[in-house]
Image: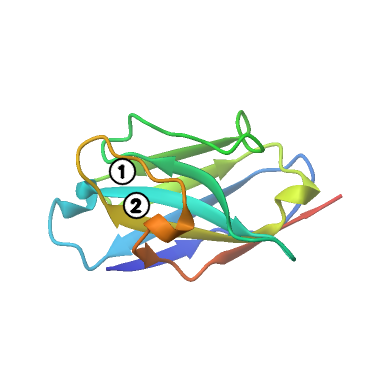
Amino acid sequence: VQLQASGGGLVQAGGSLRLSCLVSGVSGGTFSRYVMGWFRDAPGKERDFVAAISRGGGNTPYADSVKGRFTVSRDNAKNTVWLQMDSLKPEDTAVYYCAARPAINTAMYYSHSDYNYWGQGTQVTVSS
């Protein structure tokens, strides 16, 4: 299973970015068996949970720091998950990673140690 994250960049505070994560190496229809997560590494900090989305997309928990500003979504037919980031703040500056974990039914995962597969990361820089 390979994950390819993209969409990072430099944006001014208050702006928006949309991150994408394309998952390959999964056979037809099996992408829907994975819970997908977004995490970020800020300078000097541990890897933090940002958001996740359940297999069918009905459960989308967020970190308190991004709630109301970020939206996670997925298209199981396209093996893709997105993270729409609005009202960006300088403290959102980090390397963002998508991650995948096969899951059973309605299971949800919030720790980076729970995820099996990781993308390469994409840099998001928000200037003040």
| Position of 1 relative to 7 (above/below) | below
- Give the residue drawn at x 31%, y 61%: 23
Taking the image as shown, residue 46 lies to the left or right of residue 58, namely: right
Q: Secondary structure at mark 1?
A: strand
- Give the residue drawn at x 47%, y 34%: 61
Q: Are marks 2 and 1 in contact (CB under 8 Å)?
A: yes
* Label 2 crowd (10 A; few <14 / some 14-19 / many >=20): some
Q: Position of residue 21 (x, y in %)?
A: 42, 57
Residue 75 circle label = 1
Q: Position of residue 70 (x, y in %)?
A: 58, 37
Residue 80 circle label = 2
**Cα–Cα gap, marks 2 and 1:** 6 Å
**Frontmost residue, 60 versus 72:** 60
Residue furthest right in the image: 128
Q: Amino acid at mark 1?
A: Asp
Q: Quadrant of residue 106?
A: top left
**Frontmost residue, 99 versus 87:** 99
